[in-house]
């Protein structure tokens, strides 16, 4: 399709209202999804809840391959398919739903910088721990990742994924890092976030933005996911304002919304609670 | 010393299509200018020795099966016939470039007066041969680079490697073939391959990596093939605009299947046959030997050809098939049947019949297609006896349907066209199609349609 035609289609899509049957796709929650995918998926869910856009969560074993970018989660809205938080934020904006409209240019730049920090530090650290730490990869990541497939495809796909992530780590210079250094990086990232948040309810005072959704997705998932060691979650637990930030978003956007909506069951997708 | 004289063959019924190569053999039997020349009429003879000259890598034990019959010859005609058969058998092994037969009177101390020695002078193929060719498949062209090792271990085993770069797909394959000594039709082969295909009618891209082993053997007039195949299939969308139904099928799956195929083929040629019939029955059971695809698939193909007046041929064919999912999982888009296009139901776009979603054809779990064809020579027969004989006029009636077991009445097409036979490999068709019955969603190709391929309905 030509660029003009594609632009036309997205214009048309923008004109359509948010449909009732919008669906978010992610890997199987019980046996397959990994920390990093779970965090990204939760960030998108939190963002959509903050925008008050209803979405049904559907778990598919082949979610990763269904996604146009090869990354989860992705949403299917009308006849559009959009993957990952960044493009989804753009997509909702085109439909007239935005959380960052109230920010000025400086704040918006700052928000983007912090989102980059979270993606570069927390997400990369999650990927590192999942695939480059031998204990985690052999005990958790590879068995979970390959659980929907039968022998010998399960081994082939798991090692293929591990090799792909390790190659990426090589490219960005993380391959030489030790686990302690990675924990240290996470700790520094959390410190930066904690300082920026201070005593405010959200990063930009009273109103949540996509940065809040992203930080919540990652921190909440790390806090509630059991890995081979607790060290990663311990790093976050030392910042009490981040903990209460997670608790606040969980209460406001997940527990209360679920209580409000009668069809709460289909929206339950976040997994374990903080308390 | 005597030499078989060609003259002795004259009164014998040695002509006919089966023995057409005989003339070549006779050329080799040059009369030697010996003082005592004896003309052997159809005498009773004994074949005392059979020599094979020119063997290098080939193990002799394989060849003894092929030439054993020559010893059983009781008279001269028999010797000629059986030597000829043995020569054909040797050539069929695909390990010799040339086989020449020399029949001579026996020599040596134990030579009988009516004893004969038969000598096969063979020239082996090179240890390795390379090839480069361009292929025309079902509406697709590709360039194929091949490497062949005939006779790897000396018993007619063949190892081939092929790399093909095509207009739609790039693929490679490695195969090892071993016939049972003495029974070339009973053979065993192992294949390793990677095939990438793009299917624009479904907005689907499929990459298969697989291994298969198969055994072929004849029983009476039928040929059977038993096969196990393990394939890792990777499906993906061809474009971002692919329908969601196709997107849902994306991802990896593993198919491990056992299949059986039976073929009876009495046609005189696979391309534009003049007489004979073909029956092909294929069944595949997947899921019992591992993998995550479980289904039972049955399909058949029947073709009957009958010669009419003025070199016309009437041909009728029927195809059909059914796919049953085993267990709760629905069938995969990669396993379902597709129908339509110039090689199956003419008058429709390629594989554009049956269930679809947003313009992407999803295939069906059952199908049938029938065709009635009348092939006649060109009107007024231009180029008769030469180039013109490659062409045929073609009148036909096609009908078919593809569905998920509860779909309605099928689409039909009625058409006329001209067919060109391309050597013995493929056929090209230029048809004018008038679709007579169509269902909503099917993509028709009204008017002129061009088709090239090997397998035709």
Image (cartoon, coloured by chain):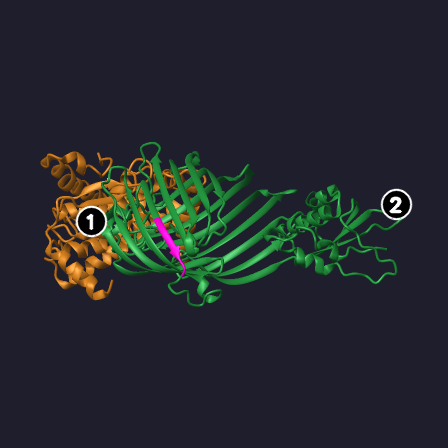
Could you say which quadrant of the image residue B33 lies in? bottom right
Q: Residue furthest front?
A: B11
Q: Residue at left 39%, top 57%?
A: B376
Asked whether the residues under marks 2 and 1 belong to the same chain, the reply is: yes
Is A199 on the left or on the right of A28, as rendered?
A: left
Chain B's shade in the image?
green
Is B101 on the left or on the right of A234, as rendered?
A: right
Residue B119: percent from the left, percent from the top? 76, 52
Rate crowding at label 1 as few (under 14), some (14 to 19) or many (20 or more) other CA atoms within 10 Å.
few
Say if residue B456 shows up in the picture. Answer: yes
Q: CA distance from mark 2 to mark 1?
A: 84 Å
Q: Quadrant of the N terminus of chain B?
A: bottom right
Host chain of mark 2: B
Residues rendered magenta in the picture: B372-377
Rate crowding at label 2 as few (under 14), some (14 to 19) or many (20 or more) other CA atoms within 10 Å.
few
Q: Residue furthest right?
A: B109
Q: Which residue is mark 2?
A: B110
Q: Which residue is mark 1?
A: B440
Host chain of mark 1: B
- Specify whether residue B90 is painted magenta: no
Residue B19: percent from the left, percent from the top? 63, 52
Q: Secondary structure at mark 1?
A: loop
Residue B266: percent from the left, percent from the top? 50, 45
Q: Residue at left 59%, top 53%?
A: B17
Q: Secondary structure at mark 2?
A: loop
Q: Residue at left 39%, top 50%?
A: B314
């Amino acid at each position: 399709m030509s660029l003009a035609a594609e632009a036309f289609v997205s214009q048309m899509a923008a004109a359509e209202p948010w449909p009732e049957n919008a669906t978010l796709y992610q890997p199987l929650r019980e046996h397959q999804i990994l920390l990093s995918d779970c965090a990204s998926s939760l960030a998108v869910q939190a963002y959509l809840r903050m925008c008050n856009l209803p979405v049904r969560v559907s778990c598919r074993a082949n979610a990763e391959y269904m996604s146009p970018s090869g990354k989860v989660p992705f949403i299917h809205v009308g006849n559009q398919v959009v993957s990952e938080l960044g493009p989804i934020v753009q997509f909702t904006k085109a439909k007239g739903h935005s959380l960052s409209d109230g920010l000025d240019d400086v704040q918006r730049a700052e928000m983007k910088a912090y989102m980059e920090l979270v993606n570069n530090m927390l997400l990369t650290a999650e990927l590192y721990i999942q695939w480059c730490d031998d204990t985690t990869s052999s005990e958790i990541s590879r068995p979970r990742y390959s659980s929907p497939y039968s022998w010998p495809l399960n081994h082939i796909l798991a090692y293929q994924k591990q090799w792909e992530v390790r190659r990426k780590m090589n490219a960005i210079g993380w391959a030489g890092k030790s686990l302690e250094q990675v924990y240290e990086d996470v700790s520094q990232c959390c410190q930066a976030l904690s300082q920026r948040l201070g005593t405010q309810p959200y990063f930009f005072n009273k109103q949540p933005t996509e940065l809040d959704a992203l930080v919540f997705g990652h921190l909440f998932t790390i806090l509630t996911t059991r890995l081979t060691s607790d060290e990663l979650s311990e790093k976050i637990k030392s910042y009490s304002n981040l903990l209460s930030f997670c608790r606040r978003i969980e209460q406001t956007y997940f527990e209360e919304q679920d209580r409000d909506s009668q069809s709460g069951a289909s929206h339950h997708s976040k997994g374990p609670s903080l308390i | 010393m005597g030499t078989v004289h060609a003259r002795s063959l004259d009164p014998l019924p040695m002509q006919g299509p089966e023995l057409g190569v005989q003339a070549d053999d006779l050329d080799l039997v040059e009369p030697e200018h010996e003082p005592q020349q004896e003309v052997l009429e159809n005498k009773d003879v004994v074949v005392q020795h059979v020599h094979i000259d020119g063997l290098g890598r080939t193990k002799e034990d394989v060849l003894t099966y092929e030439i054993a019959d020559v010893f059983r010859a009781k008279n001269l005609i028999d010797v000629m016939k059986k030597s000829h058969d043995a020569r054909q058998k040797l050539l069929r092994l695909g390990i010799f470039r040339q086989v020449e037969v020399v029949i001579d009177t026996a020599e040596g101390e134990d030579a009988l007066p009516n004893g004969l020695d038969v000598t096969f002078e063979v020239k082996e193929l090179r240890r390795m041969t390379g090839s480069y060719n361009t292929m025309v498949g079902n509406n697709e062209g590709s360039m194929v680079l091949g490497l062949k090792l005939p006779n790897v271990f000396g018993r007619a085993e063949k190892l081939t490697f092929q790399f093909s770069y095509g207009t739609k797909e790039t693929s490679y394959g490695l195969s090892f073939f071993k016939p049972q000594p003495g029974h070339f039709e009973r053979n065993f082969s192992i294949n390793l391959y990677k095939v990438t295909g793009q299917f624009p009618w479904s907005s689907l891209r499929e990459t298969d990596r697989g291994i298969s082993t198969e055994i072929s053997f004849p029983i009476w007039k039928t040929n059977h093939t038993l096969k196990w195949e393990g394939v890792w299939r990777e499906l993906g969308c061809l474009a971002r605009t692919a329908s969601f139904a196709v997107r849902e099928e994306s991802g990896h799956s593993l198919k491990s299947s056992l299949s059986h195929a039976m073929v009876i083929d009495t046609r005189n040629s696979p391309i534009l046959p003049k007489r004979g019939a073909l029956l092909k029955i294929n069944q595949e059971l997947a899921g019992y030997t591992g993998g995550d695809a479980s289904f039972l698939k049955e399909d058949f193909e029947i073709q009957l050809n009958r010669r009419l007046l003025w070199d016309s041929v009437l041909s009728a064919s029927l195809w059909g098939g059914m796919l049953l999912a085993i267990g709760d999982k629905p069938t995969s888009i990669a396993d379902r049947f597709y129908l339509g296009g110039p090689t199956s139901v003419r008058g429709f776009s390629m594989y554009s019949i049956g269930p679809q979603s947003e313009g992407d054809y999803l295939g069906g779990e059952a199908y049938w297609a029938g065709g009635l064809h009348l092939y006649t020579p060109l009107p007024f027969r231009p180029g008769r006896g030469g180039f013109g004989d490659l062409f045929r006029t073609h009148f036909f009636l096609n009908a078919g349907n593809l569905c998920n077991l509860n779909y309605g009445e099928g689409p039909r097409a009625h058409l006329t066209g001209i067919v060109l036979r391309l050597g013995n490999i493929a056929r090209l068709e230029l048809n004018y199609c008038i679709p007579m019955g169509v269902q909503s969603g099917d993509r028709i190709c009204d008017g002129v349609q061009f088709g090239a391929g090997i397998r035709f309905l």
